[in-house]
Amino acid sequence: MHRIPLQSLPDVINQEILRFMTPSEIFLASMTSKKTRKLIKRNIYKVDEVGVDFEKRAKVYIKVGGKSLNVVGFYFHRWNGVVDWKDNKEWQFLENIVIIPSISSNSSGWSSIRYQVRSIHSYICDVFNIDASQLSVKFSDFIHHNLFDIGTVKKCTIMEGEIGTRNSSELFEQQKNMILLVIERSREISACGYAYFYQHVPTVIHRNTQIRVNWFLTRFQGQHGLLENSFLTGFYVKAFLKLWSYQKMDNLVSMIAYQSVERLFDYERVLEVLEEKLRNSEAKTLKALQAEKPSEKRIYSYEEIITQEHEFEADTFDCDGGYDVVRNSDGKRATIKISKDYFMFFVWP
């Protein structure tokens, strides 16, 4: 069979070839030579993210258009002394993914594993033209906080069953530069956990918030919250508005909470307060706020990293028909959207 070197083909052809290859195949091809790696980097499709997912076996994945695709898997055990991952000749194919049998070192423990995890991640980031400093990590099971250098994790996904564990507290203590935390629903029934561990993370997505919504509405010190399956109550929404009116949650930019179908949201109690403020600006309830009902149509500009993790309905940020609240202390304005299904709060710049 006649072989045609990739280097002899025009870029437009190589781009199509790469689209038909799996990420693992692209990864292996990049290891064959520096010329091939350079060709791949020049022609590879746009990748949104390169991350590391830890379960029984660790995997480095890429995210393209919201879909995660595995690139390489590896095992990590401190007691197995093995050479550097690039020199390991025992790679295997399993479930359409190339597997490195082990990346561990018997001599230096976690520091060696951290180095090799960082090396694999950085290499794949380079191949797919992604900034390796924006490290994304997913712990699908146990939190292995020892596998990353302090302050290097920017985005982290954990299971709700791990909230409040010793490992989660150490993770948040070590990774204070984290900008996005995603808390996924666990298979098992989860206790509430200690939410204050992550109250200062700038952006938090919680897939199964339930009663933790009360904590978010009264203790969260980040900028953006997206809370799904919440047990919203009018009492805590009013407490949230009072705290914001007294500048107790002054970092907040947006809060979006979707009510659980399992619970009724007594949102009418909040509407009553807002309507009272509209009629009488001197009303004692929420006395540090003024309420308005703007007539002009407005769309809230929401370009946060949450949009990479959640697909919003088209009218989510349409503020027409919402209530505006204005702080007496500094004139800061926010819009409230509320119904039996959700509570949304958007602070205007």
Image (cartoon, rainbow, N blue to C red):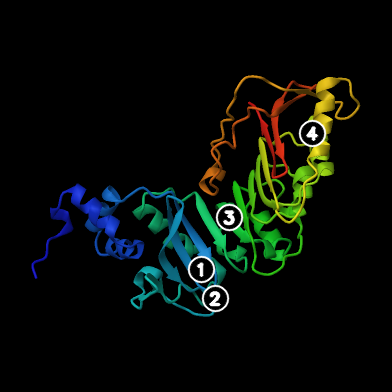
Q: Give amino acid for label 1.
A: Ile
Q: Earlier in the sequence, mark 3 or mark 4?
A: 3
Give the structural element (helix, strand or loop) at label 2.
loop
* Local SS, label 1: helix
Dot 4 amino acid type: Leu
**Callouts 4 and 2 close, C-beta under 8 Å:** no
Badges 3 and 2: C-beta atoms under 8 Å apart? no
**Residue 176 rendering spot, x and y as whole percentages:** 64, 49
The residues bearing labels 3 and 1 have C-alpha atoms spaced at a distance of 19 Å
1 and 2 marks in contact (CB < 8 Å): yes
Instruction: Give 149 or 246, whichever is nearer the viewer.
Output: 246
Report the disc number at residue 113: 1
Q: How dense is the environment of label 2, judged by Cα within 10 Å: few (below 14), some, or many (20 and up)?
A: some
Residue under pointer 3: 156
Looking at the figure, which quarter contains the N terminus? bottom left
**Where residue 168 sits in the image (x, y, percent)?**
68, 61
Left or right of 343: which side holds 130? left
Mark carried by residue 271 = 4
Q: In the structure shown, which secondary structural element does the residue marked by tag 3 occupy?
A: strand
| Image location of residue 34, percent across then percent down | 25, 58
Looking at the image, residue 122 sits to the left or right of residue 162; the answer is left
Helix, strand or loop at label 4? It is helix
The C terminus: image quadrant: top right
Task: Write down the residue under mark 2.
Answer: 78
Gap in Å between the C-alphas at discs 1 and 2?
8 Å
The amino acid sitting under disc 3 is Cys
- Tell me the amino acid under the disc marked 2: Arg
**Residue 9 percent coordinates (x, y):** 14, 53
Residues at marks 3 and 4, CA–CA distance in whole angstroms: 36 Å
